[in-house]
Image: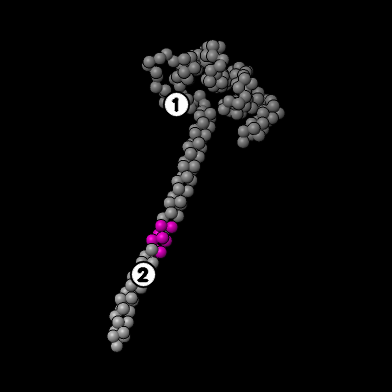
């Protein structure tokens, strides 16, 4: 009988131990599962952050490209109506900057003189192709089609990879149309479409 009581007594203590072990194992498995879920979520966050960075960079590049295209499409009238550049008080403006200010003020003949002076003295400047473009725009506005054609052709010939070349070729095509050279105009405009889609 003592043995029987001893077995019952020991079995009473054994059952709670088994339950505690089961609870511990279940808790341990839940913790492992949660750690795995956290690792998966961290990985997803890293992937999403990488995608976000990529798309932000892509959007910035697209915004810059659109801004560049809008700038290239600006005409003299747009420049005249836009806000005047803040003048640099601490340094003298070069003749290109002066010309742009003069265009904005509507003083086209003075701007043309400043641009001519600029291209005569600054063949290697980054602004030289732009100066030829704006000379073409001023001459086109003034009705000097032959001189405008020469300005645009100089830009296209000397700086064939400049970002204003497509617009200069388009302007040349419109000049040729206005002059009655339909075949030459169509050929040039088709080349613009083909080269700059």
Quarter of the image that includes the C terminus: top right
Q: Could you tell me residue 143's position as x and y percent? A: 58, 19
- On the image, numbered disc 2 is attached to which residue? 21
Mark 1 secondary-structure assignment:
helix
Q: Which residues are drawn in magenta?
A: 29-36
Quarter the N terminus occupies = bottom left
**How much space separates mark 1 and mark 2, taking CA atoms?**
82 Å
Image-quadrant location for residue 81: top left
* Residue found at x 62% / y 20%: 158
Question: Is residue 131 among what the camera can see?
Answer: no
Q: Is residue 10 one of those drawn in magenta?
A: no
Question: Which residue is outermost to the front?
Answer: 2
Dot 2: few (<14), some (14–19), or many (≥20) neighbours within 10 Å?
A: few
Residue position for label 1: 81
Asked which secondary structure carries label 2, the reply is helix
Residue 176 at x, y percent in the picture: 65, 25
Whether 31 is among the magenta residues is yes
Q: Residue at x 36, y 69 (%)?
A: 21
* Left or right placement of residue 43 versus residue 151 in this view: left
């Amino acid at each position: 009988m003592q043995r029987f009581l001893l077995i019952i007594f020991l079995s009473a203590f054994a059952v709670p131990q088994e339950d505690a072990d089961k609870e511990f194992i279940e808790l341990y498995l839940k913790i492992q599962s949660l750690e795995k879920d956290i690792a998966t979520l961290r990985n997803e966050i890293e992937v999403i952050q990488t995608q976000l960075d990529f798309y932000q960079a892509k959007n910035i590049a697209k915004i810059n490209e659109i801004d560049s295209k809008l700038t290239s499409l600006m005409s003299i009238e747009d420049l005249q109506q836009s806000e005047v550049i803040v003048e640099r008080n601490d340094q003298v403006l070069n003749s290109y900057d002066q010309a742009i200010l003069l265009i904005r003020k509507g003083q086209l003949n003075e701007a043309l003189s400043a641009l001519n002076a600029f291209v005569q003295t600054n063949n290697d400047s980054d602004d030289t192709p732009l100066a030829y473009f704006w000379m073409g725009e001023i001459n086109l506005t003034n009705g000097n089609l032959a001189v405008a054609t020469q300005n645009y052709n100089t830009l296209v010939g000397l700086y064939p990879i400049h970002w204003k070349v497509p617009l200069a070729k388009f302007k040349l095509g419109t000049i040729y149309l206005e002059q009655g050279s339909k075949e030459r105009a169509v050929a040039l405009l088709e080349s613009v479409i083909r080269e700059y889609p």
